[in-house]
Amino acid sequence: MDGDTFSALGNGTQIDGKILQTFQKSFVQVQNILDQNRLLINEINQNHESKIPDNLTRNVGLIRELNNNIRRVVDLYADLSSSFTKSVDGSSEGDSSGALRSDGKAGHKRTRPA
C-alpha cells in the first residue's frame, strides 16, 4: 500500500496510502475509546440508580476516567485535523481555494450559519 495514492477528496487531490493508514489507525483508537466510554456510562448509570454509597463513591473515579477519555478523543481529532490539513496542503500546492495568509500559505476559513 506504500506509495499508493487515492483521489479521496472529490476535487482530484491525491492522498498517500501511508496517510490513509495513519487516519485509519487514529479512527480505530477513537472508536475503541468511545466503546469504552459507552461501558463506563452504563456502569455510572447503574451505580447511580442503585444509590448504594460505595457505588456512588466509585462513580467519582469512573467519571474522571470518562473525562480523561473524552480529552483523549478531542486530542486525537485535533491531531487528525492537523494531519489532514497538512496532507491536503502538501498535495494541493497551488490550489487557490483558500485565501493566502501573510506567510504565503492558504488559509481555510469555516463559516458558521447565523
Image (cartoon, helix red, strand yellow):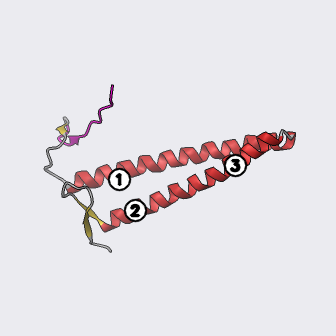
Which badge, 1 or 2, is on the more N-terminal residue?
2
* Residue identified by numbered label 1: 83
Question: Along the polypeptide, which appears first: circle 2 or circle 3?
Answer: 2
Query: Which numbered tag is attached to residue 42?
Result: 3
Which class describes the residues within 10 Å of circle 2: few (<14), some (14-19), or many (20+)? Answer: few
Q: Position of residue 90 (x, y in %)?
A: 23, 54
Of callouts 3 and 1, the N-terminal one: 3
Q: Amino acid at mark 3?
A: Asn
Depth check: give the residue in front, 7 or 100.
7
Q: 73 left or right of 22? A: right
Range of the magenta residues?
103-114
Q: Position of residue 22 (x, y in %)?
A: 40, 62
> Who's the residue at 30% across and 49% down the image?
85
Q: Contact, CB < 8 Å: mark 3 with mark 1?
A: no
The Cα–Cα distance between marks 3 and 1, rounded to whole angstroms, is: 33 Å
Which residue does the image show at 45% across and 63% down from the upper left? 25
Residue 35 in the image: state x and y as whole percent: 59, 55
Q: Which residue lies under the disc numbered 2?
A: 22
Q: Quick check: marks 1 and 2 in contact, CB under 8 Å?
A: yes
Vertical side of 82 occupied by 18: above or below = below
